[in-house]
Image: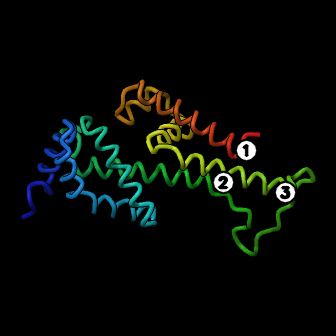
Amino acid sequence: MRPTHERGDGLAALIGRTALGDRSAFEHLYRASSARLYAVALRMVKDAALAEEIVQDVYVSVWNAAASYDAARSQPFTWLAAITRNRCLDYLRRRELDTVSLTPATDDADPIDLPVDAPTAAELLIAAADARAVRGCIEGLDSRQRQAIALAFFQGLSHGELARHLGQPLGTVKSWIRRGLERLKSCLDAAGATR
């Protein structure tokens, strides 16, 4: 028989104590569930380092949103796995937006006829450098700021929807977005990407 803290009722108790700020309970929750959540993340993103990063982000969210857990609505591990799955899906959506292929999918594809006013090779290189600068600046944000900005701008969530989704007060979410955008602007100005 599994120890109590690994069973659903034990995880629920640990989440409840975490909601009260009990760091020891949070540590036990992490030990009891992190390996399984890592397996969920790894299966979805297929990158060990990224799966570790996602799991760490999940536990930051769990620490901040443990009070929103409702045992009547879901089992503890189901709730934790849903947070993990959502973080993985957010990453996969962002990666799809970042990925643009300049080569045909197959060798049999028709060649691409570029219009006469197509960008030059130099313009494409400058655009690629700007894209790298933007990506670097975004990756330099605090994970909470990055997540709030991504959900607001890529998923179209309002500040109120973000607050509910992240389980944070409205003022906190607005502050994350405002400070994140200020940091982005400063970073992009320094990189010369905002021409």
Q: Position of residue 83 (x, y in %)?
A: 35, 47
Q: Secondary structure at mark 2?
A: helix
Amino acid under disc 2: Arg
Circles 2 and 1 in contact, beta carbons < 8 Å: no
Viewer-side label of 2, 1: 1
| Residue indicated by mark 1 | 192
Q: Residue at x 37, y 27 (%)?
A: 169
First of labels 2, 1 by sequence position? 2
166 displayed left or right of 141: left
Q: Secondary structure at mark 1?
A: loop
Residues packed near mark 3 inside 10 Å, few (<14), some (14 to 19) or many (20 plus): few
| Distance from Cα at disc 3 to Cα at disc 2 | 15 Å
Residues packed near mark 2 inside 10 Å, few (<14), some (14 to 19) or many (20 plus): some
Q: Secondary structure at mark 3?
A: helix
Q: Which mark is residue 84?
A: none
The quadrant in which the N terminus is found is bottom left
| Residue indicated by mark 3 | 122
| Distance from Cα at disc 2 to Cα at disc 1 | 12 Å
Q: Quadrant of residue 63?
A: top left
Q: Position of residue 128 (x, y in %)?
A: 73, 55
First of labels 3, 2 by sequence position? 3
Amino acid under disc 3: Ala
| Residue indicated by mark 2 | 132
Task: Compare residues 112 and 167 and report the one nearer the observer.
Answer: 167
Q: Residue at x 15, y 52 (%)?
A: 8
